Structures are given as C-alpha cells and as structure tokens.
Image: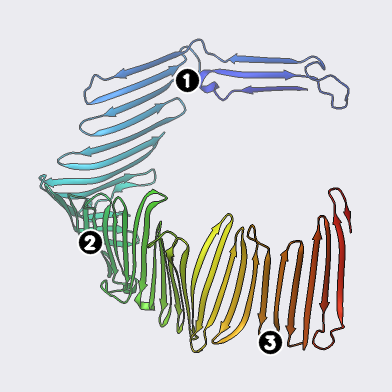
Amino acid sequence: RSYHGCFDQLSRLVGLTFCGTVNFPWDPVASKAAFFPLNGPSKFSLVIENEDVKKYHFRASLNNADPNKKSLGFLLETPGSQTDRKLELLLERTYSPYQGLKAKLDSPWKQVSAEVAFTDSDKELSLLAKATNDDQEYYAKLGALVTGDSSHATYHPLLEYKTPERHGSLVSKKGAKGRQQSQPFTVTGSVTVDRSPDSRKYTFNDVVFSTPQGEYKVEGSVVRESGNKFSTDLTIHYGSHHVVLKSAYNRPARGEVHLNLNVQPSQYRDFGVNLIWDYKHSSNNIENSLAVVHGSDPENTLARFTLNQELHYMFQNIYNFDLSSKNKVSYPLLGIIGKFDASVAPKNLHVGLEASYEKHKFETELTAKTGVKHIGDYDIDFHAKMLDNSLKFETKRDVLSPEKSKFTTDLEVHPGRKYSLVADVTHVFERNNINFQLDAIASIQGQPDQYKLNSGLVCNHHLFDTHHKLTVGDVEYVDINANFKKAPGENPSGSAKVFLKNYVVGNAQFKYASGKGSATLNVDLPKLGRKLKGTGDLQVTGSHHVATVEIYYNADKNPNQKLTFHTDTDFKKDALDS
C-alpha cells in the first residue's frame, strides 16, 4: 500500500509545504508471511517544498522610552518573496493618564486589535473596552463624569457603545434642533457620593434606565461604613409599581455575621420577604438564627418562619469530650413547631425531639447517665407522647457494694397501667467461686398481689446449691432447689426439691459413704393422679461397681408395678467388663 499527503496550512505564514510518502507491503491473504518489516520492501520519505522564500526576518523590540507607556513588538516576514507574509504583533501597556492594555495583530489577511482602558480622575471614572476585526469595530464605555470634590462628589452616568450595526450614546443627549435623539437605551440622573473617614454614602438622584421594554427608576441610598457594615434603602420604580429594597449587613468581629434583607413589591404584596440572619462562631460554639417573614407586613409574627441552632463541641480524647446541639424551627401560620436537642459526653447522653402540627403533637426524650456515684451504675429515663397516648420508661442501677446492686425499673403506658420491678442482686463471678442471688418484686398498677422471685446459685469446690421460688401474693407457684455437698474429707450427699403448683411435687436425696451409696425419689403428679417412687443402691469394691435402681410408677395404687435396672461392672485399667 502507498500513502501520500501534504500539509500546506502554514504555507501562507512561512512559505513551506510539508509532504510525506509511505510505502509498505500489504497482503491480507498471505497468512504465513513474515511480520513487518520482514515481509517485503518498505519506503518512507519526507519532502519540504519551498514556494518562494529566500530568507526569514524576525524582530522583537521593547520600547520603554515613555515613562507613561511601555510596548513590546514582534515582527516575522520573508523579504524578497513574491507573497506578502509580514506578520506583526504589538502589545502596549499605558500607565497615565489612564490604565490600559492594548494588543494589535497585523497580517496581509487579517487585522485584529483589542483594548481595555480604566480612567480614574477628578473628572471621570470610566471603563472602556474596544475590539476590531478588519473593518468591524466593537466599542463600549461605562462610567460617569464627576463634579464636586472628594468629600461630596456627583457622578453623572456615561454609557457609550458602538457595534457594526449601530452606534450611539446610552446617555440622553440633544439632537441637531433640540430634539431628543431616539436611542434603544438611555440613562439619566446622577449619583452623589459623600465621603467621611468612617463611611461612604451613595445617593441615587432619580436615576432612570430607559429600555425598549420600559423605564426603571432608582432612588434612595447605599451606605458603607467601617467595620464591615453595609446597608441599602432603595426604591425601584417600574411603570406604576415599585419595589422597596432595604438591607443591612454587619460583620462586627471574626466569625460573626448579621444580615437583614427586606424586599416589598407594590404589585405583588403577598410576595414580600423580610429575612433576618445572625451567625456567630467561636472556638467551641456555633450559633445560627434565621427568620423569614413573608407578606406585606415585615413584622408579622404569624407568617414568620424561624430556625434557631446552637452547637457546642469540645474533644480532647475519648474520655474527655462534650458535644451538644439545640435546634428549633417554627411556623405559626401552619401551627408547626419542631425541636431537636442532643448532647453526649463520656457519662451522659440526652436526646429530645418535639414536633407539632396544629393540634397534633409528638414528643420524645431520652436521658442516660452512667458512673453517677460508682463505676457501673446507670440511670436511663425515656418517655414518648403522641396525642393522648404516652409511654414512660425508667430504669436504673445503684451499686451498693462491689458485690451487690439494686435495679429499679418502671414502665407506664397511657392509656394503660404502670409496671414496676425492683431487684436486689448479689453478683460474685470468680474462676472457682460463683455466688449469684436475685430477690425481685414486680407489681402491676390496679392489681393487689405482687410477683416475687427469689433465685440463687452457689458453686465452688465444696458446694453446689441452687434455688428458685416464685410467689404471687401469698400463693407459691414455683419452688425448685438442689443441693450437692462435696467438701474434702466428707462423704458426698445431696438433695433436690421440685414444686410446681397443681402439677408436680417431688423430692430426692442421695448419700455415699465407705463404698456404699443410696438414693430415694418421690414424685406426685396431681393432674394425672399418679405417684412415682424410686430407690437406688450402689456398692463399690475396688474396681467392681454394682448398682440397682427400682422405679415404682404407680406407687400408691399398685406397688408391684415397677421397673428394675441392675448393672454389675468391673472398671479395669485396660478393660471394661459389664
């Protein structure tokens, strides 16, 4: 394949054309051919064609002879060629009597220039922008003519423009015979500036902007004071209507802002807005307050939306920190009130939420404390309310000693009842010594009887003892206990008792001494009308164990109905014979 191409886009500028040719073998059918460049002859060539250039002339010059002006020029040309390629760029900086920048580019095929000038003198304050593209010119000048002195000056508007389609002055002026010239845009009036060491006041004296769509008149004042203070009191007229714009901005210190913006249109009085914003930020606190009043009365307390926020934060480490926030929003016109407060510290937590709409109200609050008097104690209080329904929950733990605590819990539901639970707890949990005792009393509002639970567990090298008793009023419903003694030097023995009111009554005992053991069991099932009895014997001689167990499953009615289990087992060192 063969490719050939020329790049002549720079020919008008430098008089050179760049051409290139590439030849390489290409046979997509030959699948066993060698890879490029071993698959055949290839050729690459680059040719530079000179049209009529004999030499190049480049010049750069800096002119700073004038103290009020500096310029930098660049020139590129091809002397002696038939084609005119002279390219000249001029950059100019003006310092006096105005501040300006100018750039101009001349070439045989395009002339372009751009200029920006700023004038600040006793007689004029203006900004000028000008641009040309061949014979097309764009021109605009914005500013004012100044009369008076530095403490009391009057500025008359100066607005001029020029485009390829039209040109004229935006300032109203007289025609040849005293007639007003018709311009698309005009500005009349003046602005008076009063200066003092601490303030500047700008007064708009019937400043009228005329456009094809109508006239807009501005009157009033703008004041800027030291200490970052700014305020406006303006009235903008359009047709037979007007808009009053009043504002005040103050930043008295770092981190503090006050803003008041009041806009009142005469045509749409219900769309009036009065905004008040205060913000304060210190090292550990943030305060934010926003109020928006809508309607024709800027002091209306009913059509007023308010938002108040406070934030406090302090953090040194996970054991020493304090974070709190308060938030409130209200809109009386719709009966809306909302509050959200929260605080957290290493030993305290508080969350509060309140919301209301007209007569509908919801509120909830959670307070939690720990380590109040002793390590491990706590106090939790939670309540919630919606309309006429409410829920209140309180629970706390008082540490009486390292081994004893008292727990108190109350739950109140409205409509409904109050439920209370008080528990005294002994808690010893060591590696070889467990002592857990629970004595709890529960009561329900409106019920005379209390629910009592007594439960315990003792477990160590010498004793295993557990008991559980449940009573309602004076009636006992559950009584379960078990005891096993295994002290060194004493014969092991134990007993157990089970009482489930109307269902089970039972007891058991066992003992062991000098290679002989015995056990008895008695169970009464009132609901089934049946009694069970059991006996057991164990005799141990060396490694020889003989045991007999008899179960009388209808002991009170037919003692002959029984199950007997007998085992004779010899536990040897390396064998079992049973």
| Label 3 neighbour load within 10 Å: few <14, some 14-19, many 20+ | few
Tell us which disc is closer to us: 3 or 1.
3
Residue most toward the top?
A: 54
Q: Mark 2 or mark 1: name the one nearer the start of the chain.
A: 1
Tell me what residue is drawn at x 84 percent, y 19 percent: 34
Type of the residue with mark 2: Leu
Tell us which disc is closer to us: 2 or 1.
2
Q: Which residue is mark 2?
A: 234
Tell me what residue is drawn at x 60 percent, y 72 percent: 467
Front in this rendered view, residue 18 or 165: 18
Color scheme of the displayed model = rainbow
Q: Secondary structure at mark 2?
A: strand
Give the Cα separation between the discs numbered 2 and 1: 59 Å
Q: Secondary structure at mark 3?
A: loop
* Tag of residue 85: 1
- 454 lies above or below 34: below
- 74 lies above or below 113: above
| Label 2 neighbour load within 10 Å: few <14, some 14-19, many 20+ | some
Front in this rendered view, residue 496 or 360: 496
